[in-house]
Amino acid sequence: MTSFEPPLYGSALVLIGQNSRGEWVAQEQSGLFGGLFKTRHAALRYALFENGHHPDSIVETAGLVELDMSAPSFAAMQPLALPQRRVA
């Protein structure tokens, strides 16, 4: 059984290209999502899914693209822990 997850970022601009090791990279311009792939097809499929199936928001480059996941993520913006309440 395959699980389905809806796209997280509708129509986000995604850059696709190969890194210095020949792997395919798909990365959202702000670094909110991205991944490494064996094939161009797999990178393109991922980019389309994550950006809400907007092919006009995908840019393929002939230059090197290195995956950079150092951008702050949504999870990093969330509070680390909720205040604790004692229940008697």
Image (cartoon, helix red, strand yellow):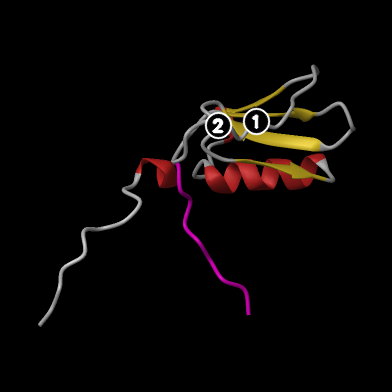
Q: For this rendering, which residue is in front, 14 or 83?
A: 83
Residue found 31% across the figure and 56% down from its top: 81
Range of magenta residues: 1-9
Q: Indicate yes or no whether the magenta region holds residue 4.
A: yes
Whether tag 1 and tag 2 are in contact, CB under 8 A, the answer is yes
Q: Indicate yes or no whether the magenta region holds residue 62.
A: no
Relative height, residue 84 to residue 18 (above, below): below
User: What secondary structure is marked by label 1?
Assistant: loop
Task: Please identify the quarter of the rendering in which residue 22 is found.
Answer: top right
Residue most extreme to the left: 88
Residue found 45% across the figure and 42% down from its top: 9
Judge from the rendering whether residue 34 lies leftward or rightward of residue 43; answer left or right.
left
Residue found 74% across the figure and 35% down from its top: 25
Residue highlighted by disc 1: 68
* Quadrant location, the C terminus: bottom left
Judge from the rendering whether residue 34 lies leftward or rightward of residue 71; answer left or right.
right
Residue most extreme to the right: 21
Please tell me which of labels 1 and 2 falls first in the chain.
2
Q: For this rendering, which residue is in front, 75 or 11?
A: 75
Estimate how packed mark 1 is, as few (under 14), some (14 to 19) or many (20 or more) residues with alpha carbons within 10 Å. some
Residue highlighted by disc 2: 31
| Distance from the alpha carbon under mark 1 to that under mark 2 | 7 Å
Q: Position of residue 77 (x, y in %)?
A: 36, 41
Estimate how packed mark 2 is, as few (under 14), some (14 to 19) or many (20 or more) residues with alpha carbons within 10 Å. some
